[in-house]
Structures are given as structure tokens and as C-alpha cells.
Amino acid sequence: MIKMKVIMYGAEICPNCAEAWEQLKEYGNIELDYRNITKKISTLKEFLYYRDHENIFAPIKEAGKVGIPFFILEDGTKTFEILDFIEATNTDTNSQAGACSLDGEGRC
């Protein structure tokens, strides 16, 4: 079985992040590097750099969402969709699913 390395930016207080993290633990071929943006300022700065400079975040920011969980595959692909990397496909990387709202309203 080939291991796939995945970086996940998230926060324990985000229900979608917790759900994604639990799902990923079930896959033996995924080596997860979980980066909690609420634990260290350096991790938050890493995440904010991506949020400020990657086009994938444009619709997320316009919708008033944070953009977590956010995943980076070992090939550099960036996505918000957990199934994109579980199935090793890159479909719909601009989806807003799972991107927490800044105002705390509605789906995280």
C-alpha cells in the first residue's frame, strides 16, 4: 500500500475539521500532518499566508468563511474537499463545502 502524505489545516473547535480528521484516521494509506491553527501563532501565519495568496480562497473569503479544513496533497494540490484526496482525484477544488463562517452562522 502506497502512503499518501496530506497536510490538513484546521481547528479543534471546527466541527467539519473534527469530522474530516476522524475520517482520515480510518485510512491506513494516508499520512496526515494535522496543523491546528489555534495552537501556535506560526501555524496560523502559515495558514493565513495560503488564505491571502491562493486563488482557491477567493470564493471562501467572499462568502465570509474561514477556509478550514484546508488540505494540501503531497503533489501540491490544494483543496477543501476530503474526498478529493481520499479518492486521489482533483475534482471541484473551488468548492466552499466545509469552510467555516467568520460570523459563526450556519454550517461551519
Image (cartoon, helix red, strand yellow):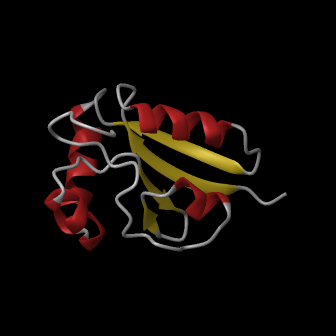
Quarter where residue 85 is shown? bottom right
In the foreground, 39 or 61 = 61
Placement of 51 over or under 35, stated as above or below: below
Residue lying at 22% horizontally and 49% vertically, measured from the top left:
65
Q: Quadrant of residue 23?
A: top right
Q: Quadrant of the C terminus?
A: top left
Residue 35 image point, x, y percent: 41, 39
Give coordinates of residue 28: x percent, y percent.
Answer: 77, 44
Q: On the rendered image, what quadrant is the N terminus found in?
A: bottom right
* Image-quadrant location for residue 5: bottom right
Residue placed most toward the observer, 17 or 35: 17
Q: Which residue does the image show at 40% across and 54% down from the upper left?
A: 97
Left or right position of 31 against 65:
right
Q: Nearer the viewer, residue 100 or 12?
A: 100
Residue 9, how many percent across, how many down?
A: 39, 45
Q: Residue at x 40, y 46 (%)?
A: 69
Seen from the viewer's position, the closer of residues 30 and 18 is 18
Q: Is residue 59 left or right of residue 79?
A: left
In the visual, does 88 lie left or right of 33?
right
